[in-house]
Amino acid sequence: MGGFVITGLPDIQTKFEGKVTFYLVVCALIAATGGLMFGYDIGISGGVTSMDDFLLKFFPLVYEKKKRAKEDLFCKYDNHKLQLFTSSLYLAALVSCLFASKMCRGFGRKITIQVSSIFFFMGVILNLGADNLRMLIAGRILLGVGIGFANQAIPLFLSEIAPFHVRGALNILFQLNITIGILIANIINYYASKIPNGWRLSLGLAGVPALILCVGSFLISETPTSLIERGRHAEGLEALKRVRGTHNVEAEFKEMLHASETARQVERPFMSIFQRTSFPQLVIGASLQFFQQFTGINAIMFYAPVLFETLGFKNNVSLLSAVTIGIVNVLATIVSLLTVDKVGRKLLLLEGCLQMFLSMAAIGAVLMTNTGQNQALDPDSAKGVVIFTALFVTGFAWSWGPLGWLIPSEIFPLETRTAGYAVAVSSNMLFTFVIAQLYLSMLCRMRAGVFFFFSMWIAVMGVFVAVFLPETKNIPLDEMVTRVWKKHWYWKRYMDDGTRSFKATDILDAYSY
Ligand code: BGC
């Protein structure tokens, strides 16, 4: 049987075979379009909330405040209802991903993905026809439920169908779609802002990625892991052969059977993730989400047009700058996709920290020295802010953006994977909500200080990664506990030495192995 020698870890040889087949790529590309829904939504909110006719219809007070010429530059958008428009979606996603995790485990990843697109689509219809704030927020909540389901199922799906040596790259297709979604949203906002009631177009076009995902999802395979986990061994074996493009899947199938048998013995996965042996994965999974959001990325993603307008750019120029930032975001994510399985997760995260720390501090410094008397920035400083923002986004896009989704999807053993991943996703949504809800008020009260606040957190997360994060590059999912956690200088103390009692041979015999 062919196999892979893993570079960088000379002691590990594996007998798993897996080609990057056409079918595998098609499945991954289709599932990853769920990232478009999430990204489109992230990108659309900021632009829409700076469109005058949208504000006039739903947030007349903000509109009034924005029009008052002498309003404090840093405070003109500080309004809780406006922030609720952006952040209500994340609250809904936070709760829904817990249900999605149950569905993922009990019914599979594929159906969870399908359900996500349907909820999202319903949300789009409500938003498109919204006539009052209530309809608008109800629509946002449905979108949020869709996103909770998608963000729970898709990264897991991608990590599970991928052969281990390209798992990082395949998983990052999700983040790549997020960034493409953000970019498309920014471009649409740019044009929609020029036509009357353009906000309806902006919100309505969110239906396109949902439709693509819904139709496309009928073509994809359920993950072999999920089929085996639900006792459908024969189908699981067939699916494994199909996605790996080979009949030589005995070793991997055997390992999946072991993992699923252990998983089946766990009746209440949500309880078992709070056991001592799950502590390391839980801490890493949740803290990566906290850190990802406390980089301050969404202060920029949601509010880039608002931020640039606050700095004195005209509405069109600020949306155009947001588009530029969006392009940088996509390109840098491709760099991550191409390098993550070679240089590893840790190096990317650490480099990202350094770059983000310096650029966030630089934005803070420019704003602090230039916006003293509530005057707009001078053109050079404004350009400086856009350049440092682009550098910040580049650093995020090849590190904490994609790896925030990749790492939690690969560190949990099967028995706690869906539950553990749900905790990670809901933490992400929680902290996204917190930032979305607080950022404009923080900008108003802390002014340039808000950027130093974020750079402080970036320094903390760099130290955390250096000390506590194990490297997971090129480790098969079902060998994560033995090869990573039991060997880590700190986390090994949480691992027990229990060996699995299950013997896979009987089942393997039944499948002629
Ligand atoms: C984050 C989002 C962020 C996006 C930016 C994602 O990984 O979860 O909160 O807006 O990256 O590209």
Image: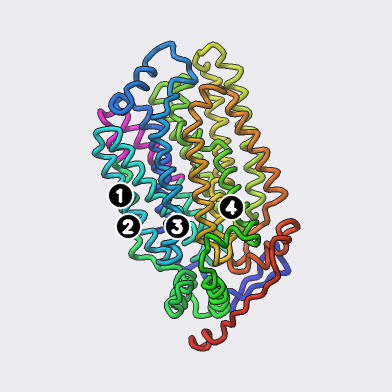
Of callouts 1 and 4, the N-terminal one? 1
Of callouts 1 and 3, the N-terminal one? 1
* Mark 2 Cα shell of 10 Å, populated few (<14), some (14-19), many (≥20): many
Residue assigned mark 1:
121
Of callouts 4 and 2, the N-terminal one? 2
Q: CA distance from mark 3 to mark 4?
A: 16 Å
Task: Name which residue type carries label 1.
Answer: Phe
Disc 2 is placed on an element classified as helix
Residue 371 tag number: none
Residue drawn at 72 percent across, 61 percent down: 492
Taking depth in this image into account, of 349 and 477 the one nearest to the observer is 477
Q: Is mark 4 within 8 Å of ligand 1?
A: no
Residue 473 appears in view: no
Q: CA distance from mark 1 to mark 2?
A: 9 Å
Task: Name which residue type carries label 2.
Answer: Cys
| Above or below, comparing residue 512 to residue 309 in the picture | below
Residue assigned mark 4:
285
Of callouts 1 and 2, the N-terminal one? 1
Say if mark 3 contacts mark 4, CB within 8 Å.
Answer: no
Disc 4 is placed on an element classified as helix
Residue 178 appears in view: yes
Residue assigned mark 3:
154
- Magenta stretch? 179-203
Q: Is mark 1 within 8 Å of ligand 1?
A: no
